[in-house]
Image (cartoon, rainbow, N blue to C red):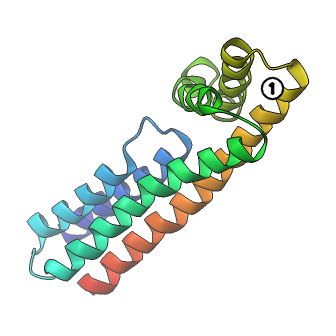
Amino acid sequence: MEILFWTMIIALFVISFIGLIYPIVPSVLFILGGYILYGLFFSFEPFNWFFWVVQGLLIILLFVADFVANLLGIKKYGGSKAGIWGSTIGILVGPFVIPFLGIIIGPFLGAVLAEWIVNKKGFKEGITIGFGSVIGFISSVVTKGLIQALMIIYFFVIVT
């Protein structure tokens, strides 16, 4: 049974990384689900207050990193709040409209269209801002992946 329990816990951790590419998957909830399964199957004893404080801070850092990376990517290339909103909508909608490539094309088109429609920016400037949104998204994925890995590594350090 122990193998089955660990397989379920690790599966939740793996699914959390899918959330990096498909933002509709709530990565943090799958990581927390892995912790809860461990507690139910084995013991909650290793999870002291310090563990939960560290995990809580890392969760906050995940959300901040996501927002800041997107913001910086768009702002660096001359985008506005409209570009940020368009990019965010594109990140959420893109993978469903265009499987696989939609995660890159979605934020790009979202930022370009938002800047073009709301701020009446030219095509060339919109393309540049769209490129910035993709850079921001990729930076966000890398940063969040590292933070999630740190959360999971800390979990294994605590339980072993």
Residue 47 in view = no
Identify which residue, 146 or 66, lies in the foreground.
66
Crowd rating for badge 1 (residues with CA inside 10 Å; few <14, some 14–19, many 20+): many
For the point 77% across and 34% down, which residue is it?
129
In screen coordinates, is 120 left or right of 58?
A: right
For the point 23% across and 65% down, which residue is it?
35
Q: Position of residue 13 (x, y in %)?
A: 38, 59
Residue under label 1: 126
For the point 76% across and 14% down, which residue is it?
120
In screen coordinates, is 128 left or right of 102?
A: right
Q: Amino acid at mark 1?
A: Gly
Residue 124 in view = yes
Identify which residue, 61 or 148, lies in the foreground.
61
In screen coordinates, is 153 left or right of 34?
A: right
Q: Position of residue 85 (x, y in %)?
A: 55, 28
Q: Position of residue 15 (x, y in %)?
A: 41, 50
Identify which residue, 89 or 35, lies in the foreground.
89
Q: How many marks?
A: 1
Question: Which image quadrant is residue 50 in?
Answer: bottom left
Quarter of the image that includes the N terminus: bottom left
Q: Position of residue 114 (x, y in %)?
A: 66, 20
For the point 37% across and 67% down, which residue is it?
58
**Local secondary structure at mark 1:** helix
Residue farthest to the right, as pictured:
124
Question: Which image quadrant is residue 160 in?
Answer: bottom left
Vertical placement of 146 versus 109: above or below?
A: below
In screen coordinates, is 154 left or right of 158?
A: right
